[in-house]
Image (cartoon, rainbow, N blue to C red):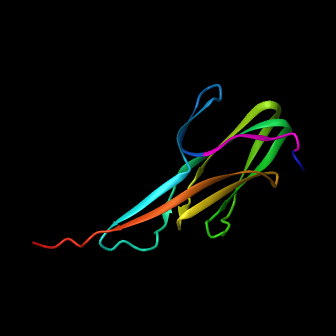
Amino acid sequence: MAFEKGPYIAIAAFCENVIEDKSGVLSLIRIVDRLLITAQGPNTPEEMQPFPINWLLVISMRAGEVHGSRSIKIEPEEPSGLKLPPLVLSAHFEGANRSTNLITRVNIPLKMPGVYWFRIYVDEMFITQVPIEVIYTRIVTPPQQSQ
């Protein structure tokens, strides 16, 4: 099914926390799209060790002419191009300019530096994608000498 007249993405972002008030208005706390990982010491690994994230993915959509329940698929892809298992949710659209907000926790290990893409589909139709850029830095320090 093609959505030529909706849904439309209003927000698609990772953040550390979300506050949703009684009227459904969202406040996103610490929107993140880049992660700096630093390893420091005398024996720091050359390759990045897996680093788990536990962030919230917020997707806010305007329905347009879409009504009813729809499947929402979030498909992560590593910088290597490897696609990870998708997360499948559902959302209910009420048409017009009504918003539908999805807030889901993403808890995956980031295994390498580079850009991870999280592609978002509504009923198998690609809508948008959200990146997380991982930058790995290592600082090798001399071993401490005993006195």
Q: Is residue 91 left or right of residue 45?
A: right
- Magenta stretch, main secondary structure, is strand
Residue 11 image point, x, y percent: 67, 40
Is any part of residue 74 visible from this angle? yes
Residue 5 lies in magenta, yes or no?
A: yes
- Farthest residue to the top: give it: 23
Place residue 91 in its image quadrant: top right
Chain part drawn in magenta: 4-13
Residue at position x 61%, y 60% from top?
A: 116
Residue at position x 77%, y 31% from top?
A: 98
Q: Please state which of residues 28 and 107 is positioned toward the viewer in this rendering.
A: 28
Residue 147 image point, x, y percent: 9, 72
Is any part of residue 58 visible from this angle? no
Q: Please state which of residues 71 and 60 is positioned toward the viewer in this rendering.
A: 60
Residue 126 image point, x, y percent: 79, 53
Residue at position x 81%, y 55% from top?
A: 124
